[in-house]
Image: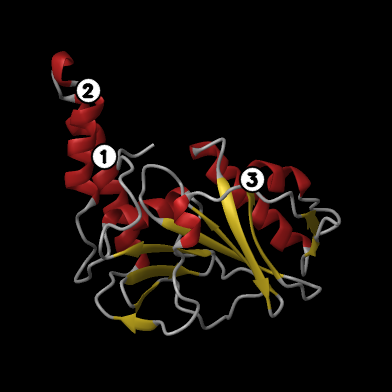
Amino acid sequence: MTARLAFADAGEAADLAAFLARLIHYDRAAAVRLQAGNGTLAVFGRPPSFEVLAIRTARLADPVALDATVSAGELLESVDELASAADVPAAVTGPPWAGVLPPRSGWQQLDGLPAPGAVQAEVAAVVAEFRTRTEELPAESRTRAEFDRIGREIWSRTLGETELPVRAAHAAQSLGFLRPVRAMVPAGRAAGEQPLALLTAGAWLRLRTPYGSIAVRRASALGGLSVTPA
């Protein structure tokens, strides 16, 4: 029997749909792992090019226990914003990353992360640098390998006094997790929550925003995807 997710309100359903649509923009065959418990749904995805895990949570109206990997596209098609609900599609064979998720607890906050405005400015600066450097390449050097080399150099840089690679912040922006500094904290989130926070647990780093999180491992254990921005 197909499980049905009842969200706390239409906004939760709409935000989840937007997140899924962004994932599919980067990978039309994207899969997501769903974990639900204690009235919250956590959705994990891995957008190509960024070498990160994206995590979006949604509040549920009805408690449900769930742990499944499904097609992001099929889940998106099932989201009914008017009914604030979605049907869980049939499970799919999960990609390798789906078996290596960040821990649920034990996170500690780290210092050194720049202010939200500075993070957004850094992302804009490195995007512009990547574009300029690739556009300046001679025709014979405009290859995927050269683009990837430049990308690895730029996107492995760290933010402020932290170990967090810039690609994590770029992923957060591309997936709608970084909003203008003046933006309100979304409904259902703690009003006193910091706009951005850097957390650590074991080998993981997590950039937390009121709209979602981006997790990376200090060791490059998520695989060898290209880091060329899309």
Q: Nearer the viewer, mark 3 or mark 2?
A: 3
Q: Nearer the viewer, residue 149 or 125?
A: 149
Q: Is residue 69 above or below residue 181?
A: above
Residue designated by label 3: 71
Q: Secondary structure at mark 1?
A: helix
Identity of the amino acid at label 3?
Answer: Ser
User: Spatial distance from mark 1 to mark 3, Cα to Cα?
Assistant: 33 Å
In contact (CB < 8 Å): disc 1 and disc 3:
no
Q: Position of residue 3 (x, y in %)?
A: 80, 60
Farthest top residue? 139
Q: Is residue 169 above or below residue 104?
A: above
Left or right? Give the position of 57 relative to 7. Answer: left
Q: Nearer the viewer, mark 1 or mark 2?
A: 2
| Residue name at image x 28 percent, y 69 percent | 114
Residue designated by label 1: 128
Identity of the amino acid at label 1?
Answer: Ala
Q: Position of residue 109 (x, y in %)?
A: 35, 82
Identity of the amino acid at label 2?
Answer: Thr
Q: Quadrant of the C terminus?
A: top left
